[in-house]
Amino acid sequence: MPIELTFFGWQRPAIYDLVDGVEGARARVRLATQARSLAPDGEVNRTTTARLTVRTAGPGDVRALAPDAITGRYPTPGAPDAETPLCPHVEFADPTLPWRYTPAGNPRADDLSLRPWLALVVGTDDEVELAGETATIGAAALREHPLRQSPTWAHVQELDGHRLARLLCRRLLQPRVTYHALLVPTFVVGGDGELANAWAASPPGPVTLPVYARWRFRTGPGGDFRTLADALEPGAADASTGLTTVRYPRLPDQPVLSVGGALTAVDPPADVPPQAIRDDVDLLRGRPTDGIGRRILGLPTYGGAWKDQPDETAWGGPLNTDPRHRGIAGLGSELGVVLQEELAERVAQQAGAQDAAEERIRHLTLGLAASEALWRRRLPTDPARRVWLFGPALRRVVTAAGPVADRATADDRPLPRGWFSPAARRTLRRGPARVALAHPAAADPAPLNQVANRPPTRPSFADPGLPSFGRLGAAEFDRERAEAAESQRVDAGAVAHAFGSLDMSRFRSHTDDLLEVRDSLQLRRSRRELPWVRLTLLLTALADGEDDPGFDAATVGDLLPGLAADLDEQNDDADVLPALLRELGDDEDPPPLFRPVDLGGLGTELAAAFDPTGIAAPARRRVLSTLTGLDPARPLEPPEQCPRLDLPVWRRLADRAPDWLLPGIGQLGEDVVLALGTNPAFVDAFLIGLNTRLLEELRWRNLRIATGCTPIRAFWLRTDESTGDRLDDIAGIADWADDSSLGHILPRPPGATESDLVLVFRTRLFQRYPHTLLYLVSDSSGFTEPPDDDAPRTLPTFQGRIGEDVTFFGFVGVRPQAVTGLWIALEEPPSGFRFRNDQPATGVDDGAQFAHVAFDDPTRVLIRGDHLVPGASS
């Protein structure tokens, strides 16, 4: 959202509207005053008129400024590269300060100019001589500060209701010059006590003036962001950009070969070396002896550290037989030789704790072997005896529901409390007199566990006054049932208990009615007027369930519905007291449901939990938790380190051989922009050579490295835009697909493209403005309209500098060919409000007008992407 600035030419209190002249080097104000005397009733008795003369403070009365009077300075004190097209300035917290002591009245309403009593004078070492709190300013500097322009030097700025004053210096600055910035008065008091200009208009001579503030700065090489950005020109990189030629001297009649550097054109040409060259290279690799049988040192086979037969892969064959790829791999190998001390030291630092880790693993392995032998010899085979063995420790085996000992002896379990306690074990220990004469089974934990784990027997229906269900034959059962029904001498409690003991799951069709009868009987078991005959008949008709042969479905169907209704009707009054008791929490607890413990399963699970050789064994878990980097599938094997080195490979290559990073970089013109692409084939070959040499050096130094390790996987040091993590340029070489060609997408990490767009700038812009914002914006108008401010932006993923003035920016995931539909945008980094001294100021009379003319708007430069590719623009 654009900000709204307002500029004013001056600001002073209204009293200066009354100034009518200068007297004694001060502004004079004459006032007419009236004095009135009032009577007690409020009437005016007398009026007296008088004229007063007041002189305000002038420039000669100022000795120094308060420490907090100045709130900002530009350039900052000591700046080494100030921009020459911008005006030095100071900012004041009090917006009236630059005009407060000006010996003149406020201008008329139609006059916006007022001369400030202060000036910011900028001069070189030759033009300024400092002496304490004064400075002698030479004529050359004074000519650059004509006092007739002083009304345009100061202005008031208003932003969001806040005002400040700013004093500018309009002198044109020269590049690479040290300047002094001096805050001095524009008026001086002469020997006669009268005011005069601080320096003459023509011809000016050296003057000595008091200095209220001063600082030094040095200008840069010239220009600012706008001038440097305006000088940029799009350069269309043809197909040969980033390519160089190599010869194969062993076969001089063969054609020269083109080889690309780390950065190449958007669509580089592809060629294959002649078969004769490839055969000759293969001959050099495969000749183990000379003509008289002596072994010779041949060319290395790249990829052998990761593949048994690298030549049989789609990437290893060209790498070993194409002299171009071999040369790039050799370049990486050479860098490995140069950096071998640094690389080996970094790997050794990562492997510093490997010996200690190996010692811990050896001790752990020995302890686990000893524990396993004791475990096999002492562990009972019977699960019930295992439970008894582990019993004293079950209180320390905690589950989500509590200790195992508490869960196994809970209220709904048959095992009594304390069954697994040490006291119980001492009671059954062989030897004391209490068990000396007992039968061996009486103190044997295995059968005792089974007996203690047995649930209580269900109460029998053969209670007093009820027929016996199981001991009688059919005829005798029917006879006793009839007699009991006719006599009506039935124990009410026994009937209620019999109904309460029924397994309701066996009566699927009558569960609700039976539950209703049971609940009613629990409340009314002492009442003699209950229908005992029907209750007895119903109970005997139910037998053991609906699936029992003795189940009398007809009798149950006739008796049960009416019986439930009668019981409810008879006992409405009896519900009051039980309901009240329930509200008071005085319900009778239901009998517990005894669930036997699965002793066999518990013994098996406890053995697995206590097994000292298991995966979750405490010793194993505790020791391995102190180690990192182990193979999860084989944690007890001696660790093999696979270090990961975050090395700025491209920068090391640029330091040693910048032409291989971008061949032909020396021929780039000044202030040019190129669209190039990364060369993944170069990166793959280079990193294979570098890793090959590094692994050889590490093994030579007896640093144990995991088989198939790829220590260096990044060439460009790219970062993930969302997470900030490093992105690899290659995957582990051992994981490269055999059918993937060199530079193909397959040997690269997931999500990577074959080639990424890289923008190359040869300009001093990024050197002077390292925080310049650069991004890509998609074009949807055919480059007829600039992109919207809120359009989605693509920021660089990696960047770097080659030499003094070549800067590149890479965009991961953006194909180089896509640049033809993109805007390249450069935005000036925020630097506050600035004013230019290279703008024509004709017709400008006051500071507000000059501020509008000279205001340095933030600069955004847009470059059409289709102008960076030959033939892409019309």
Image (cartoon, rainbow, N blue to C red):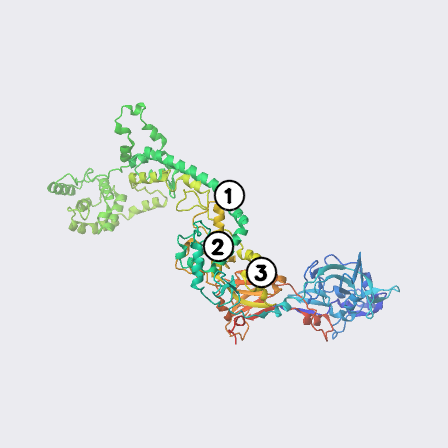
Q: Which residue lies furthest to the right in this view?
A: 192
Across and down, in percent, residue 745 comes to 43, 61
Residue behind mark 1: 352
567 lies left or right of 119:
left
Decide: is 364 above or below 629: above
Q: Is mark 2 on a helix, strand or loop?
A: helix
Give the mark, 1 or 3, whose residue is nearer the N terminus.
1
Residue 417, can we see it?
A: no
For label 2, the residue is: 689
Q: Which of 19 and 606 is in front in this view?
A: 606
> In the picture shown, does residue 332 fall above or below 544?
below
Residue 801 tag number = 3
Q: Mark 3 packing: few (<14 Cα in 10 Å), some, or many (20+)?
A: some
The reply to whether residue 196 is visible in this rendering is yes
Of residues 108 and 218, the one drawn nearer to the viewer in this rendering: 218
Dot 3 amino acid type: Arg
Tell me residue 335's x, y (percent). Answer: 53, 54
Viewer-side label of 2, 3: 2
Q: Quadrant of residue 862?
A: bottom right
Q: Quick one: quadrant of the N terminus?
A: bottom right
